[in-house]
Structure formats: C-alpha cells, structure tokens
Amino acid sequence: MQVVTLSLKAQNKIPIVADTVSPDNFAGKAEDEIKAVQVWYGNMQCPLSELFNVKVEGKDSVENTKIVINGDASRVKRIGQGMSTGEIEINGNVDMHCGSNMKGGKITVNGDADSWLGCEMKGGEIVLNGNGGYYVGGGYRGEACGMKGGKITVNGNVRDFLGEHMCGGEIHVMGNAGLLPAILNNGGTIIIEGSTEMPASEMKKKALSS
C-alpha cells in the first residue's frame, strides 16, 4: 500500500487547480517526485511542495495507492479528476469539479463539496459526508450526457440541478435537493430521501425517487 498525505501549509484565497492530484499520477513515485508535481496556483504553476506538506509511505501500484488530504481544500479544484482507480480521502471541504470525469476508484469527502462534484463521471464511487453544491453528477454546458456510471452518495443536502443530463449510474442523497433534480435525465437512478422542487423535468428514462 502507498499512502500519500498532503496537508495544506496555509489557507489559500487564490484558487489551486489540482487535477494532477490523483492515484494515477502519484502511484510508484518517491516523495521528492511527488513534491515536484506541478499544480496551478492562480495563473502560474508551482510545485506541490510550495503549498502542501507532503508525506509518502510505501510504494505500490495505482490500485493500491491512497491520497489523504488534510485541511480546508475549499479553494482547491479538480482533485481526482479523471482518476481510474485507487482512493482519495479529503478531510475537510473541497472546491469545484472534484472527481469530474472519474472512471474508477473511490473519493471520500469528510466535509462539504462545491459545484460539479462527480460531473460526467463514468465509474467509481464518491461519498460526500457533508453538503453538495450545484450540478452534482451533472454535465458541463453543451454536453449531451452528465454522469454515465458509478455511484455518488451524499449524506447531507445538495443544491439545484442534481444529475442534470444524467445518462447512467446512481446518485443517492440522504437529505434535501434544490430545484430541478434529474432535469433532462436520460438514464441512471436518483434517490432523494428528503424534499425537493420540480423534479424530473423533461426526464426520458429510468426512475427518480423522493
């Protein structure tokens, strides 16, 4: 098992774009190599070690690689974007696009997530132990399909447009959802345990339960 622990050095107001933070990119790398991985900080790139304390334990294959992120990542975007396997655990809030285009593996967020969580994901699992923003499991503007596979579980509430253009997979919200969940839904399953408004507008396939 390889465990990579990232701890924010200081709360950042400038957004960090961390699409390079995934098990696919970290697996088998030594600590110095991971420290040198580039992320966007505003309009410039910098090594991960400038913004995070980095600790690496062990070395293993991608499916046996786990990333643990400690601290408030509410200004850190695109964590786990496109990941295919492995695991990410975020102990705090997270910014937009977490797990977008995800193909496999598991992301656990022990906090709240901003908009587009799991957007256009194709496989894997996301567990959000707080509240979600807009477009959870949805699609980006102009795309015909949002989420195509995998599962998203939200143990809190979400905002509007849950599962917009969803074509497959499953979303389970334990709390409430905002306006227009499952709008233009073309496949998959959405379960909302709490209340919502105007669900399933122009829905074409499958079921929504609320």
Image (cartoon, helix red, strand yellow):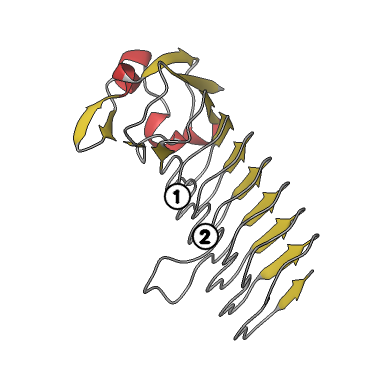
Q: Is residue 191 above or below residue 34?
A: below
Quarter of the image with the C terminus is bottom right
Image quadrant in which the N terminus is located:
top right
Along the horizontal axis of the image, is 162 left or right of 21?
right
> Who's the residue at 29% across and 18% down the image?
50
The secondary structure type at the circle numbered 2 is loop
Residue, x 36% and y 30% (percent of image)?
13
Residue neighbourhood size for the residue with mark 2, other residues' Cα within 10 Å, grouped as few (<14), some (14–19), many (≥20): many
**N-term-proximal mark, 2 vs 1:** 1
For label 1, the crowd category at 10 Å Cα-Cα, with few meaning under 14, some 14 to 19 and many 20 or more, is many
On the image, the x and y values in percent for residue 3 come to 53, 21
Looking at the image, do the residues carrying marks 2 and 1 touch, with CB atoms under 8 Å apart? no
In the image shown, does 169 or 112 lie closer to the viewer?
Answer: 112
**Looking at the picture, which amino acid does disc 2 mark?**
Lys
**Horizontally, is 73 left or right of 180 in the view?**
left
Question: Viewer-proximal residue, 115 or 190?
Answer: 115
* Numbered badge on residue 206: none
- Relative to 114, say whether 110 is above or below: above
Q: What residue is pinned by disc 2?
A: 122
- Inter-mark Cα distance, 2 to 1: 14 Å
The residue pinned by badge 1 equals 97
Does dot 1 land on a helix, a strand or a loop? loop
Indicate the position of residue 74 as horizontal and vertical percent values: 48, 35
What's the residue at 60%, 58% (across, down)?
159
Residue 9 occupies which quadrant of the picture? top left
Dot 1 amino acid type: His
Q: Position of residue 126 (x, y in %)?
A: 61, 47
